[in-house]
Image (tube, rainbow, N blue to C red):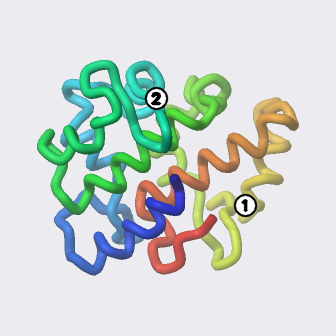
Amino acid sequence: MTAVLRAALPLLLAAGAAAPVTAADGPDLHAYWDDRCAGCHGDAGPFARATLRVVDGRLAGPHHGTAVDDFLRTHHLTPAFHGPVIAMLAAQVQTRPVYAARCARCHGPAASLVRQALRWDGREWVGREGGQPLQRLLARHGGVPEADVPVLAGTLRRVATEVGLATGAIAP
């Protein structure tokens, strides 16, 4: 699903979509969700994991079956954000919630942590303060089990693109 998000973000920027922005001036899907959706549905991650699933590559839910993406075209999403929000929700459904279980208690929402603590150095995601590569930083922080480091790093990299960081060269 990250490939869908990567493909959609440059189109959003080119279209000049009105969107919440980060300091990097890219669209911030999490701020968009918080502004448009959270009032009824809460945080996107827990909402997606509790109510949605991916069936045959399509987002499915209890009320709309596999037509969730069709429903969302008319449910408070601007056309420019339809695809990226679908991709974000599908990624949350398909990713083991390591961040929620191991990190959120101290660091709050992943989107907030990423905005404050990560940056793209042109080659890889690094900590803002010490410039340590993300994977290495996670392996030495908070007792994260070695098996969880790749999942956690992948989640934070995905969230970094979702909040609009590194929009000039959206990183893996």
Q: Quadrant of the C terminus?
A: bottom right
Q: Is the residue marked by circle 1 packed among few (<14), some (14-19), or many (20+) residues within 10 Å?
A: few
- Residue 162 coordinates in the image, percent (x, y): 44, 55
Foreground pick, 11 / 102 = 11
Q: From what the image shows, is residue 122 above or below residue 154?
A: below
Foreground pick, 172 / 99 = 172
Q: Is residue 76 left or right of residue 70?
A: left
Q: Is residue 30 left or right of residue 72?
A: right
**Numbered circle sitting on residue 130:** 1
Q: Earlier in the sequence, mark 1 or mark 2?
A: 2
Residue 5 lies in quadrant: bottom left
At a point 78% along the width and 50% down the height, the residue shown is: 137
**Numbered circle sitting on residue 75:** none
At a point 29% along the width and 70% down the height, the residue shown is: 12
How much space separates mark 1 and mark 2, taking CA atoms?
38 Å
Foreground pick, 59 / 92 = 59
- Residue 57 coordinates in the image, percent (x, y): 48, 44
Q: Residue flagged by tag 1: what amino acid is it?
A: Gly
Q: Is residue 105 left or right of residue 143?
A: left
At a point 29% along the width and 43% down the height, the residue shown is: 69
Q: From what the image shows, is residue 127 above or below residue 24?
A: above
- Residue 32 coordinates in the image, percent (x, y): 27, 49
Residue under numbered circle 2: 53
Q: Secondary structure at mark 2?
A: strand
Q: Residue flagged by tag 2: what amino acid is it?
A: Arg
Foreground pick, 119 / 62 = 62
Residue 28 lies in quadrant: bottom left
Q: Secondary structure at mark 1?
A: loop
At a point 20% along the width and 68% down the height, the residue shown is: 17
